[in-house]
Amino acid sequence: MLVQMAALWQMFPRVHAHPAAAAPPEFPVSDCVTTLDRAQYDTFALSYVVPTDDTVLTEGDIPLRDAKSHQFFAFRGQVAALGSSHVYRPFAPDAVSVAPLPLWITEGDVQRAAAASAQLLGIATAAELPLDQMLETHAALADQWLRMTPDDGRLPILARQTLVPVRWGLSDVPAGVYTVAGYIFSPPYNGWAVRPGVLKIKDAQHDPPAGEIAALSETVFSQQGRKLTACLDVPDGSTLDGDYRVEEQPERGWQSWLRGRPIRSGELSLCFHTSRRDVSGNLRLRLTLLAPDGSRTALHSHDTITWLQGQGPCLESRTQCCAFDEAPAPALSGVADEVVDIAPPAAAHCSASLPGRAPFNPRTLLAALALLALLRARGATAEVKGCSAARARRHAAAATGHRDPAAAGWPGCAARPRRAARRARPAK
């Protein structure tokens, strides 16, 4: 099988497989969401650079006419690096959760590489690959990608080639949210490079919600919260649902965190936290954006939070927070707030009433304060009367020379005669 071709190279002393794909395309820094309205744009200009020319075949390369070249694709989901490979997560919330990105595009590429390697090595090599090892035949990725450049129009890895942007015609491209990725064709080791941010294409009938979650990787104890930032481009009236999943326990599925949070375009800041004591491990977050027309876009965090159970005070920092976003959020101006929050409330930072306690009533507090003032007034009157009686008994006891235990009176009354005696004492 062709998947064993890398091992075949090592069987021959004159051929040594190169350890990685050829030079990848490098993309410039761009907005986290690049929005194109088809009423104003009919093409998208993709700019990229290469660190150095890389067209010369060396030992280990399979000699094909288009070896060491680049091709570009648009995916209807997120493409993220996972170790030395890449995985795909669709923007559609109900689609397959994750799929490895194949390193071959078509069966024709596989057949050509197998034939060229057989001629080079002087032996026959099989050209059969599982269907999920080729992008064109991967069942879970069907209808999830579009070619920006054709298979027979792959671009050589040359610095001068990058001086001209790749132009992608938008006339036949459905409105939606896309991730752009560059494919590196350098058999037997092919690869991918991902353009940062997402590409949003809209028209008069469709304005899909789009966004990107910033990096989250950090170890967080359960008494803390993790600050989450994202940039959004959404139509007015959109809402957000938040979920998380323990990567080590995929059978538990996605756990609810927020529901129905009103959102608007721009930067989004949240404080992630879960009060569940049975949650620990690497958590991946998902934000599902819901537009008024019913269109939805699921954003997954590219990395994970290491969540550990702990106890102690919550301390704010640059990345950690204490104002947990587990309670219903206030409605934005002009947006109905119909939040349904099914996450357990945070004990220390939830603005909702705690279970089993009556809601706060200011009239109850005022009545309690009035009663306390009345009791204090009555106590002061009793103290004055008690002090007068105690003084009279003390004077009678002093005149007769007999000790009267009741003359001690109220505990605080003895201080005033002593203070008076001190004031009457003549100066030396």
Image (cartoon, grey):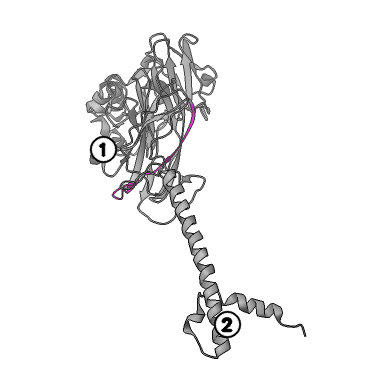
Q: Is residue 32 left or right of residue 76?
A: right
Q: Nearer the viewer, mark 1 or mark 2?
A: 2
Q: Is residue 32 visible?
A: yes
Q: Is residue 185 visible?
A: no
Mark 1 crowd level (few <14, some 14–19, many ≥20, 10 Å Cα): few
Q: Which residues are magenta?
A: 266-281
Q: Is 225 located above or below residue 383 in the figure?
A: above
Work out whether mark 1 precedes mark 2 in sequence or the reverse, and give the earlier one. 1
Residue appearing at x 41%, y 8% in the figure: 171
x, y (%) of residue 26?
Answer: 49, 28
The quarter in which the C terminus is drawn is bottom right
Q: Nearer the viewer, residue 364 or 160?
A: 364
Residue that mark 1 sits on: 253
Q: Is 183 located above or below residue 258 in the figure?
A: above
x, y (%) of residue 308?
Answer: 36, 51
Residue that mark 2 sits on: 395
Mark 2 crowd level (few <14, some 14–19, many ≥20, 10 Å Cα): few
Q: Nearer the viewer, residue 129 or 383?
A: 383
- Callout 2 amino acid: His
